[in-house]
Each structure stands twice: as structure tokens, then as C-alpha cells.
Image (cartoon, rainbow, N blue to C red):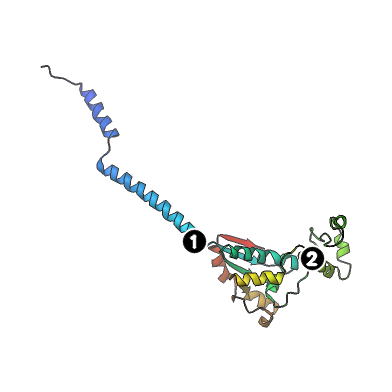
Amino acid sequence: MRSLILDPLIVFNMETKLKTTSKSSHDIEVEEFNRRFDERFEQRMQEREKDQVPRMALIATKGTLDMAYPPFILASTAAALGWEVSVFFTFYGLNLLKKDLDLEVSPLGNPAMPMKMPFGPNWFKSIDWEIPNIVTSNIPGFEKLATVLMKKTVESKGVASLAELRDLSIEAEVKLVACQMTVDLFGHNKEDFIDEIEDWVGAATFLPFAQKSDVCLFV
């Protein structure tokens, strides 16, 4: 019987191929561990995202009737969806927390004002009343007229009033936070504000909440 004599180079190539294609039991265990870790990690992240309550921080700075709607609409809607919501009222936005919501609309400098008429036939209500600022600023009582038309439009469209939206936000546990610096700056009396204010703080206290929020809006 003849002996099989292999070329040393062939033997070397075969050993190298076996080493590169075969895996040790240790390597297999490591790969299996990594695979299970990735699956578990992805599962835990999905569970965490599912259980996490979204947070929204709003900063309200304007005190006119038309600009008072966005913060309360956004806050009440987010709270209805189960979000944790906090609104920081500062400067003129602090007027939205007063017991007496006597707010007006200012057409001056507002390119979207005045609005279309909320009454009359359809052809009349469809007219865009483009009145120059020089006229709106010189006609006595024009802001009060614009305010009446705004309230009439809201009422005719079935939209909740500002007081109703604020009450909805309070019932939905929206945190209403007042800026203490603004109170001191403008000399406000705390007795003029609603009792449902969560806290009277400065920006440094509110910012950590805003930093951790999923949504942060300046309105």
C-alpha cells in the first residue's frame, strides 16, 4: 500500500482554511450572547418607550386674545392624549392667568388682521378687509371692534371660549406656572390671579423641566 505524501504547502493552506472557517466553542458562545443581548436590549427599549409618558413644555409670552388661544389649545390637547404638560407664563403671557380675562385683539402690526366678518351673507363674509395700519391705529376704538369680531367668530364657529379652554387645561391637570420675575417687574398683585397656579418661579426653575421634555414650544 502506497503512502500518501502531501506537499507541505498544501498542508499549510488546508490548516489555514480550517482555522478561518471553523469557529471555536468560545466564539460561538460570544456570538450567541451578543445576539441575545441585542434582542433583549431592543425589547427593553420598546417597553421603555411604550411606558414613557410624553412631556411637553410651553412658554406663553403674549397677552392678546388671539395669541392666548394657542397655548391653551396645545396644552389641553396634549393633556387629553395623556401627556404631562407644563406651561410657563411670562411677561404679557401672565395676563392669561388672571381671574378677569379681559383681553383684546390688536390688529396693528398684525398682517393677518383684521379678520373676515363673522356675520352677513356668504359673499360678505368672504371679503378680505385689508385695512392699512395707519387707519387702524388712528380710528378710536378699533381694537375693541376687532375684539368683538374675534369673539363673535369664535362663537359662531363653535370654538370654546378662552375661559373654557383654560378650565379644560386645569381639569386635565396641566401645570400652570407663573413667572415670579414678571410679577415683580410689573408690580402684579397675586390676588388678581387664579388659585390654580401651580407655582410662582423663575426661569431657572422651569428650564430643567423644559430640557427633559419631548416637545418644547415658545408661543
Residue 127 or residue 88, whichever sits in front:
127
Q: Position of residue 169 (x, y in %)?
A: 63, 69
Residue 23 - label:
none
Q: Position of residue 12 (x, y in %)?
A: 23, 27
Image-quadrant location for residue 96: bottom right
State the quadrant of the N terminus.
Answer: top left
Q: Residue at x 63, y 66 (%)?
A: 76
Image-quadrant location for residue 160: bottom right
Q: Position of residue 40 (x, y in %)?
A: 38, 52
Residue 37 or residue 120, whichever sits in front:
120
The residue at which mark 1 appears reads as 52
- The amino acid marked with disc number 2 is Met
State the quadrant of the C terminus.
Answer: bottom right
In 3D space, how far apart are the residues under numbered discs 1 and 2 (Cα atoms)?
A: 39 Å
Query: Mark 1 or 2 closer to N-term?
Result: 1
Question: Relative to 46, is 188 above or below?
Answer: below
User: Relative to 167, is 209 on the left or the right?
Assistant: left
- Which residue ends up furthest to the left in the rendered image? 1
Question: Relative to 9, is 86 above or below?
Answer: below
Residue 150 - label:
2
User: Relative to 85, is 51 on the left or the right?
Assistant: left
Q: Secondary structure at mark 2?
A: helix
